[in-house]
Image (cartoon, coloured by chain):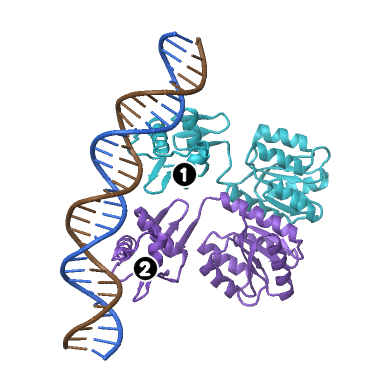
Chain colours: A cyan, B purple, C blue, D brown
Amino acid sequence: MRVAGILLVEDDPSVRTALELALTRQGHSVTSYATGEEALDHIRARRPEIAILDVMLPGIDGVEVCRRVRKLDQLPVILLTARGDDLDVVVGLEAGADDYVVKPVEPRVLDARIRAVLRRAESASSDRITFGDLVIDRGALKVMLAGKEIHLTPTELRLLLELVRHPGQVLNRRYLLRAVWDHTHIADSRLVDACVQRIRAKIEPKPAEPVFIHTVRGFGYRFSPP
Amino acid sequence: MRVAGILLVEDDPSVRTALELALTRQGHSVTSYATGEEALDHIRARRPEIAILDVMLPGIDGVEVCRRVRKLDQLPVILLTARGDDLDVVVGLEAGADDYVVKPVEPRVLDARIRAVLRRAESASSDRITFGDLVIDRGALKVMLAGKEIHLTPTELRLLLELVRHPGQVLNRRYLLRAVWDHTHIADSRLVDACVQRIRAKIEPKPAEPVFIHTVRGFGYRFSPP
DNA sequence: GGGTTGTGTCACCAAACTGTGACAAGTCAA
DNA sequence: TTGACTTGTCACAGTTTGGTGACACAACCC
């Protein structure tokens, strides 16, 4: 596993320094802050790979940072707490944290947890996904092929994003109809097929031999990078 | 989130009973065992949604069960330990556990962790099972033999998945006809046999001496890995 | 209003899939 | 060994499925 860009937020200077040092030794690249406000700014500006947040912080606390981050992005989050306060665990996990670690923590343990979380998060992270020539910017809602912007209609874009949200997975037509069109829609017929075909015409170099959106006969469609 | 089929493995009868009761109250469906051997049998036969394993078990311990399960399947695993022994945490996470909980644990906390792990597992893509050279990806609906993708038709795939869902079990023709074909089908004729034969032609190195799908004369077919 | 764009539906066609039955081969019990 | 029964094998035609292009209508924007 590659080295991670870690954001560490911890108000106690001695703990912060110690953890920063330990994680750096473990090969990670670490940036640390003492407050939630600074952390949020950093996250927005620098997009770290993972955030390790102390729960008890002055101002915006770790759980709140976690909650806001989750709305913004799929950034993996590990919460740190001074004691194993059970209530906190529940609140933290419900706020969407990926893991929860009790201080004091052995650096080796924290490292293992970081790697485990990153491994899990690897699939569903960034806002901008690249599949070979195809770049899909979920933030800007833009699709680019070989550097050139491709115009997709709203429905086409929703369908493509839905497929991309589950890379490698086969999604059947009923599911796609519910996810992309209003589930009020009863008539399915060939709607999905037609839309897929339109997307292919725009993003596939050879629509007859698609490399992105694959037909799985009898089941549905699968987005998988070449 | 829906109710989960939980496998609980804990050798201490009082702890086991208490957890089983608590989780059942929380709305989960729980099956519990005292040993790793029983747990592995259960996993192979019944495919629970998540396993909660005590680390310290007579015979095969929780970490070892976790390791073996990981080879077989992507079943989510939570490890239970009596104290927060840091070394165990590392070993456990490296064995592929999704989470790690220290006893004694508040039922509410365990429930939150279970839900968090299931939520993550749900989004994680790969849903693949490996039997020697044969890899079946249930999410991507792909079958690979020795690294090469094998094309199966929809019916063949459904039949194979049905067999694989019950590894080691003999499934009779009537059952398979109901499960794979529309149960409206009454006439059986040679349908199942022909389909099995077609699958064998694709996945068995020597279709005449099948290693995956075995004929059980007079009863039906059994999928069992070599 | 008039043109443009987006969307759902349809019909047609090629390709893929599937059920069937006949027959061969295999297995078991007497 | 023989006969009864079970399973494997194969070819083929009817059916299903999805790709494709055309088209009508609605929504939207000047």
Q: Residues within 10 Å of mark 1 (few under 14, many from 20)?
A: some
Residue B212: in sight, yes or no?
no
Residue drawn at point x = 47 percent, y = 27 percent: A153
The residue beneath circle 2 is B173
Decide which of B49, A191 is in the foreground and name it.
Answer: A191
* Chain on which label 1 sits: A
Q: Of the residues shown, which amino acid type is indicated by label 1?
A: Arg
Left or right of B127? Residue B19 is right
* Quadrant of the frame with the C terminus of chain B: bottom left
Instruction: Find residue A136 and report its horizontal and vertical position in percent.
Output: 51, 34
Mark 2 → mark 1, Cα distance in angstroms: 29 Å
Please give the name of the residue rendered at 53% of the width and 41% of the height, measured from the top-left corner. Answer: A165
Looking at the image, residue A18 sits to the left or right of residue B118; the answer is: right
Badge number at residue B187: none
Q: Which residue is mark 1?
A: A174
Label 1 secondary element:
helix
Q: Is residue B64 above or below residue B98?
A: below
Q: Position of residue A96 (x, y in %)?
A: 68, 46
Residue sitting at x 35%, y 60%? B185
Q: What secondary structure is marked by label 2?
A: helix
Q: Disc 2: which chain?
A: B
Specify whether disc 2 shares its chain with disc 1: no
